[in-house]
Amino acid sequence: MTSEDIPYCCAACRLLQEPARECIDCGSVVIGRLDTEQELLRWTQLSMRPQDGGVRARRVTAIDLPSPSLGHDAVSRSGVARALVAPLRSLLDDQPILAEQISLITRWRRSVFLRRVHAAPFALETPQVLVITGVLRLVPHTRPARERLAGDDERLARLGIPAHFLEGANLEVVTILPGDTLSVSGVVEDTRIAELAIYRDAPDTQTMIGRMGSVVRIAV
Ligand SMILES: [Zn+2]
């Protein structure tokens, strides 16, 4: 992993993302590079034990993930997901996907250490075509499988997380595949997206773009 591969992380919602001054999801300005500004994600526990020198180990702490802000004009639609562009490859195992949300969580309370959302624009047939893109939050109907990860698991490196940065977190993955039935909530716009030329001439194409303060929430 080169230093350019290290993502930024928002302290408020723990989303790993491209370098930014404010979080693309929640707008928090408490954001920094994961490795060099990791103090944003840690707290110091005061200890009464003299052998600790009054201070216990610093570690990455987990948070209760705040609910996404959907925007005042958010609406809900249901439909079947279809690919618009060539499917992405999963960050974890290279399987073709439309979107995936990878969370590193605590075992018991589902508090979140870090999370990453990996998605390309895709279509929802409602049956009108609704293009889904931008900042997404995936909410699973059923509890996904989880797996405890060693700090040097190579899948952490694929997420841009340095080895031994996070020990013993549980991996939870929510994936959207072509043909999945989804319920989406967000703000619908008429904005056309240049790269989606396939729908440029379709006047009834609408787009749900997740933005800071108006995220697209998807029940999977
Ligand atoms: Zn955030």
Image: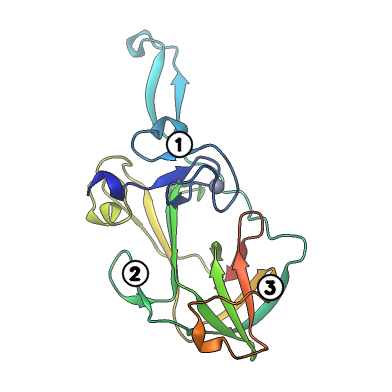
Q: Residue furthest right?
A: 72
Earlier in the chain: of badge 2 and badge 1, it is 1
Real-space CA distance between mark 3 and mark 2, rounded to the nearest whole angstrom: 28 Å
Q: Amino acid at mark 3?
A: Glu
The residue positioned 44% from the left and 44% from the top of the image is: 9
Earlier in the chain: of badge 3 and badge 1, it is 1
Real-space CA distance between mark 3 and mark 1, rounded to the nearest whole angstrom: 37 Å
* Residue 161 in the image, given as x and y percentages of width and height: 31, 47
Residue identifier under label 2: 90
> 146 and 5: which one is in front?
5
Q: Is residue 119 above or below residue 130?
A: above
* Residue 94 in the image, given as x and y percentages of width and height: 28, 71
**Dot 1 surroundings within 10 Å: few (below 14), some, or many (20 or more)?**
some
Earlier in the chain: of badge 3 and badge 2, it is 2
Residue identifier under label 3: 189
Q: Is mark 2 within 8 Å of ligand 1?
A: no
* Residue 43 in the image, given as x and y percentages of width and height: 46, 27
> 78 and 54: which one is in front?
78
Q: Amino acid at mark 1?
A: Thr
Quadrant occupied by the C terminus: bottom right
Kindly identify which numbered label has been placed on residue 61. 1
How is the protein colored in the picture?
rainbow
Q: Amino acid at mark 2?
A: Ser
Real-space CA distance between mark 2 and mark 1, rounded to the nearest whole angstrom: 26 Å
Q: Is mark 3 within 8 Å of ligand 1?
A: no
Quadrant in the rendering for residue 136 = bottom right
* Residue 37 in the image, given as x and y percentages of width and height: 40, 33
> 83 and 104: which one is in front?
83
Number of the front mark, 3 or 1: 3
The residue positioned 31% from the left and 75% from the top of the image is: 95
Q: Is residue 62 left or right of residue 154?
A: right
The number of numbered discs placed on residues in the rendered structure image is: 3
